[in-house]
Image (cartoon, rainbow, N blue to C red):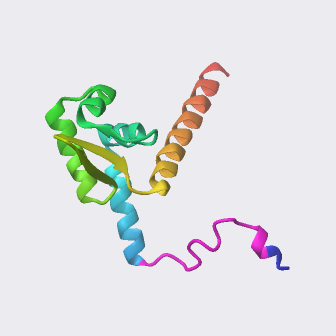
Amino acid sequence: MSARLHLSPAHHAHPRTPGEEQFALAAELLALLGDRTRLTLLHALTTGEADVSTLTEVCGAARPAVSQHLARLRLAGLVGTRKEGRRVVYSLRHGHLRTLVEEALKVADHRLTETAAEADG
């Protein structure tokens, strides 16, 4: 058995080196995540589906702004929708996105912790 198989559990998920198109799409994705409201909306959706009213409460932005952000996320293929009567319910389309949002927030937490430790020391 090769030692290489034990290095990374994600090895088989994307065995090839990313190409220009992947880098370009990843940069677009990260740019979308670079907006605080959109990041808050995506984080809210990591726990499950939600409608616009719920998401508006969570992020504290005006409903029209939330709707516009959700439309951008939907057009980018990051969130999906389904109808429940007159309500539109949003959800994350990919588990990888949940992981990306959670990891970005963990990195932010580490940076805040490091900053606080530097200020104390």
Q: Which residues are magenta?
A: 4-19
Q: Is residue 113 above or below residue 81?
A: above
Q: Magenta segment, principal secondary structure? A: loop
Left or right placement of residue 59 versus residue 65 in this view: right
Left or right placement of residue 67 versus residue 15 in this view: left
Instruction: Return the x and y of residue 19 as percentages of the image width and height.
Output: 44, 78
Query: Which quarter of the figure has residue 14?
Result: bottom right
Query: Which quarter of the figure has residue 30?
Result: bottom left
Q: Is residue 9 magenta?
A: yes
Instruction: Return the x and y of residue 105 as percentages of the image width and height.
Output: 50, 39
Picture quarter with the C terminus: top right
Residue displayed at 41% across by 72% down: 22
* Front one among 17 and 46: 46
Q: Is residue 66 magenta?
A: no
Please identify the residue farthest to the front as the structure is shown.
85
* Front one among 59 and 79: 79
